């Protein structure tokens, strides 16, 4: 097993991320690895890619000994020497985690049930060293649920609810899906349409599918439903999009419910969604999802 992957999983077992994706990120050719060892055992690690610290870990048995500070100082010096004046924690060209896992939230939220392993030690460490939460008064978080608790069983994919028809997408829907996603995300920095351009999503028997909401023969909502892409017995929903003019009709809520019911019906035990933000705790919480971890989206200006 890749030693970097192992130390990540050992220290963040509650983070759901596909193994192949993690390994691809870890093996990126632009990464720089800063290690701390004791008797050839890896006890501390940072992975730096350009001006992003993708990961900074000190193994739990070796914390509070100055090792984290030592590694962070090396990271900042490397980033400074590479000509950057800002350090970002978490998301760069891709991400192992969106940010620094924390129990701290930066605005009110609902449907919270944090993993018992999550605390604010790491985020406090970075805050004491000059890092700020770049999302200001917006939370970033993951949500999870046990599908045994899912009870919204009134409808299924293929049903029409309040005049909206919900079905699985086909490849010939892709242009309309991309248009819907762009319209839904027109006021956001990130457009979800890039994820919907993956033609594998529309192949039969793929472990990821696109659920669409159709009104008057036009696609007005989209959702990606994933089966065991992150770990065994875990399904995921995400990239929820509703056309701007069609909001406030519970289209997003119904897509999440239907997608989650499908995951339960095929026998999965758990469901999750990751890297989402304030406001969507209400949307996903309506189906039974609960916030399992917040993320400190840290950044710092260096000179």
Image (spheres, rainbow, N blue to C red):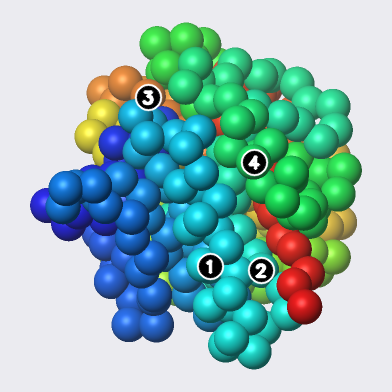
Judging depth in this view, the residue of 189 and 120 nearest the camera is: 120
Determine the CA span between mark 4 and mark 3: 32 Å
Is 195 located above or below residue 3 in the figure? Answer: below
Q: Is label 4 or label 3 in front?
A: 4
Q: Is label 3 in contact with label 2 (beta carbons under 8 Å)? A: no
Is 161 located above or below residue 212 in the figure? Answer: above
First-in-chain label (1 vs 3): 1
What numbered label is drawn on residue 270?
Answer: 3
Question: Within 10 Å of the Cα at label 2, are there few (<14), some (14-19), or many (20+) other Cα atoms?
Answer: many
Residue at image position (57%, 20%) is 114
What numbered label is drawn on residue 87?
Answer: 2
Question: Within 10 Å of the Cα at label 1, are there few (<14), some (14-19), or many (20+) other Cα atoms?
Answer: many
First-in-chain label (4 vs 3): 4
Q: Is residue 187 left or right of residue 117?
A: right
Question: Within 10 Å of the Cα at label 3, are there few (<14), some (14-19), or many (20+) other Cα atoms?
Answer: many
Q: Is label 2 in contact with label 1 (beta carbons under 8 Å)? A: yes
Q: Which residue is mark 4?
A: 125
Determine the CA span between mark 2 and mark 1: 9 Å
Q: Is label 1 in contact with label 4 (beta carbons under 8 Å)? A: no
**Mark 1 secondary-structure assignment:** helix
Q: Is label 2 or label 1 in front?
A: 1
Q: Position of residue 61 (x, y in %)?
A: 34, 29
**Mark 3 secondary-structure assignment:** strand
Residue at image position (86%, 49%) is 136
Determine the CA span between mark 3 and mark 2: 35 Å
Q: Position of residue 10 (x, y in %)?
A: 29, 36
Residue at image position (31%, 51%) is 18
Q: Position of residue 58 (x, y in %)?
A: 41, 43
Q: Position of residue 276 (x, y in %)?
A: 64, 45
Q: Is label 3 or label 2 in front?
A: 2
Judging depth in this view, the residue of 266 and 191 nearest the camera is: 191
């Amino acid at each position: 097993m890749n030693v970097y992957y192992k130390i990540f999983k050992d220290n963040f077992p509650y983070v759901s991320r596909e193994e192949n994706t993690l390994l691809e990120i870890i093996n990126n050719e632009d990464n720089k690895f800063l290690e701390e060892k004791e008797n050839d055992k890896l006890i501390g690690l940072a992975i730096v890619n350009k001006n992003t610290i993708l990961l900074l870990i000190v193994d739990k048995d070796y914390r509070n000994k100055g090792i984290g500070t030592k590694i962070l100082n090396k990271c900042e010096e490397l980033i400074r020497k590479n000509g950057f004046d800002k350090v970002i924690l978490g998301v760069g060209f891709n991400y192992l985690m969106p940010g620094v896992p924390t129990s701290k939230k930066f605005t009110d939220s609902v449907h919270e049930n944090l993993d018992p392993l999550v605390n604010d030690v790491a985020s406090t460490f970075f805050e004491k060293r000059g890092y700020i939460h770049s999302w200001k008064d917006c939370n970033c978080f993951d949500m999870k649920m046990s599908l045994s608790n899912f009870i919204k069983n009134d409808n299924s994919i293929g049903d029409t609810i309040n005049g909206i028809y919900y079905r699985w997408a086909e490849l010939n829907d892709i242009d309309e899906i991309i248009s819907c996603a762009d319209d839904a995300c027109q006021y956001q920095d990130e457009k979800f349409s890039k994820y919907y351009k993956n033609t594998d999503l529309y192949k039969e028997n793929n472990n990821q599918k696109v659920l669409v909401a159709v009104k008057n023969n036009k696609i007005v909502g989209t959702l990606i439903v994933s089966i065991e892409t992150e770990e065994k017995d875990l399904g995921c929903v995400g990239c929820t999009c509703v056309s701007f003019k069609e909001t406030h009709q519970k289209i997003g809520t119904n897509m999440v419910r239907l997608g989650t019911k499908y995951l339960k019906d095929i026998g999965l035990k758990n469901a999750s969604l990751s890297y989402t933000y304030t406001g969507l705790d209400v949307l996903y919480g309506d189906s039974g999802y609960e916030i399992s971890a917040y993320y400190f989206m840290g950044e710092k200006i260096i000179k």
